Amino acid sequence: MSLFKVRNWWKTQCPTIEPAYDSFSLHCARLCIEEGEKDSIVVGSHSGQLCIYRPAGGTSNLPDLDAEDAAEGQPNQGSTTNDPFENVFQHADVILEVQLALPVLGISSGKFTTTNKTDPRLQLAVLHPTKLCIFQIVTIDGLADHGDHTRLVTLYDHPLSKPAFSLCHGPFGGVKGRDFLCVQHLDGSLRFFEQDGISYERTLATDRHIPSPMHYLPRVDCFVTVAPSWVLECYRYQDVAEALESLRRHDPIWSLCVGEYALDLQVHQISNTESVIVMLGENNLLCVSDTGKVRFIKKLDYSPICFHSFVTGWYWEPGARLMLAVVSESGSLLLYESDQIIWSAQLGHVPVAISRANVTGLPGALVTLGATGALTIGYLGSEPQLFRVPALNLAPFEIARCQKELLELEREIRSGVDPSDASIANAAAERDVKLYVNISEETVACTHPTNIPSGAAVEMCQLSMTVQVEPKLEVLQLTVTVTDESIGCSKDAFLFRDVEARSTERFDVWMYPKEPTVPATRTVTVYCSYTNKQGITRVVQKEIILPLKLFLKPCQPSKEAQHKLTLSVVTAQ
């Protein structure tokens, strides 16, 4: 997480408060509705809502009484939650809000009509699943102090024969003062629309089962897109638009294997002789020139969500720079100059779309759109926004009061524990799982490694454990525990999951001496712990004594020994 945070300058909530937005739902452009205007922010949702915002950068004239009450008696507490540079949303910031009949898949602005060549206003192209609509934004002067009124007038629409995926526009063929439109369908086919009512459909060379973003390069009059084989392809417009099938070129003029799906594509002209294609992949950030030459590949160590690229300065100037703003899944905004990161800041939310706009009072503002319609305008703060720990009003520590509370808690614990519950739980555990342990009296030569000298004979015996399970268990574990470390076991733990009901399992292990000494105890404890379907853990244990002949060997009595030990065994009657 970055030390810096993106400062909120203006924010609002779009009408549709649900996950109905994606990276194609945000469009920032200067619509030339009036003279000297700034950029407008156009937002379209999958529910059909279309809104146009133009923030004026005004502050609220009403005092914040809650903030004043909270600030009383707390001087010099540092910065409060409300940023003093943050503007308040006003009703005049919305110039248009309309409900369309179909979901909005894409938005573009340009010169899409030739009715009046002297009219500087741009038209709005809105892509629906089965239709492409061209709108004109008309402003009507208001009466008295009511202000202006903005309406959305439909110029014409084009029905689509197949479901649409994305939209791109540009001066196809090098036309001047006009923009044509291209709609990409879900099957990968392209539908071109010219202003004279001419429309035609074309299909690219390879199969297009997975559509991807598509953009137009004005400098070379070409289209770029990513094929389902994860290859970046460039097609010349004249080849695609050729009417005669025999003269049409189907292959791209160049292609480049990128090896992953393109989350987004953007194109920019960075000089008089070069344009670049910037592709955001699932793991890489790629920049390619319009001739197919790779400028750089940036490996990303995070999962990107969306990005926006722009050029600072005029492209014909030598100081023009290519800037890239990438948003990660953790809400971090990473700013790159070409392939070098120059800034990192934390966003207040994780957006699905990001753009850049010149609004009133804040040129070069960052515009972000959340999945549920949270629209925010911010800027990169140059000072870290440190977290300040608020003062804690700790009460004085009283030993007598704490001791009294501790005694009350102990009394409640003792009153809540019934000693008879232990016997009931043990009986229930033995009904669920029955454990039988048996030790064999027969011994065989030991085959396991020990610390006993090789000349001595070492033997081992078999320990058999049988488990009968009544209910179905999630986890069952058997553990063989030996108190004395001089006794060895071939395997001391067994673990099973999802044990079936009314099943029986048998486990055999070998017990043997590991050290050349007599153990302090020959007792072996077998624990059977299990977890039932209610998530309660129970333990059943059994003990058994190993035969003495594992550790001691009989021999003939010695009458000449220096010390004598006599063992007497009394047989019970």
Image (cartoon, rainbow, N blue to C red):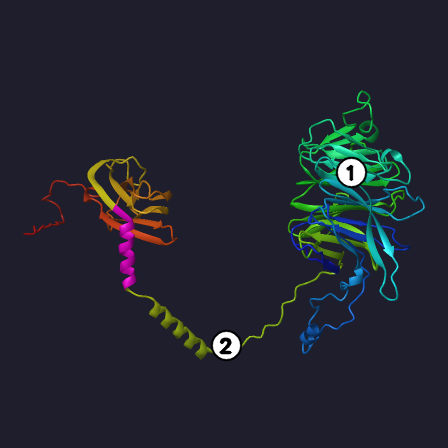
Q: Is residue 101 magenta?
A: no
**In the visual, does 524 lie left or right of 370?**
left
Of the residues shown, which amino acid type is indicated by label 1? His
For disc 2, the marked residue is 397
Residue 185, position as x, y percentages in the image:
72, 35
Secondary structure state at the residue bearing disc 2: loop
Query: Magenta span: helix, strand or loop, mainly?
Result: helix
Give the mark nearest the N terminus, 1 or 2. Answer: 1
**In the visual, does 383 lie left or right of 329?**
right
- Quote the CA–CA distance across marks 1 and 2: 69 Å
Q: Quadrant of residue 228?
A: top right
Q: Residue at x 37, y 54 (%)?
A: 536
Q: Residue 368's mark?
A: none
Out of 467 and 374, give the one closest to the viewer: 374
Q: Is residue 76 visible?
A: no
**In the visual, does 376 lie left or right of 540?**
right
Of the residues shown, which amino acid type is indicated by label 2? Phe
Residue 253, position as x, y percentages in the image:
79, 27
For disc 1, the marked residue is 215
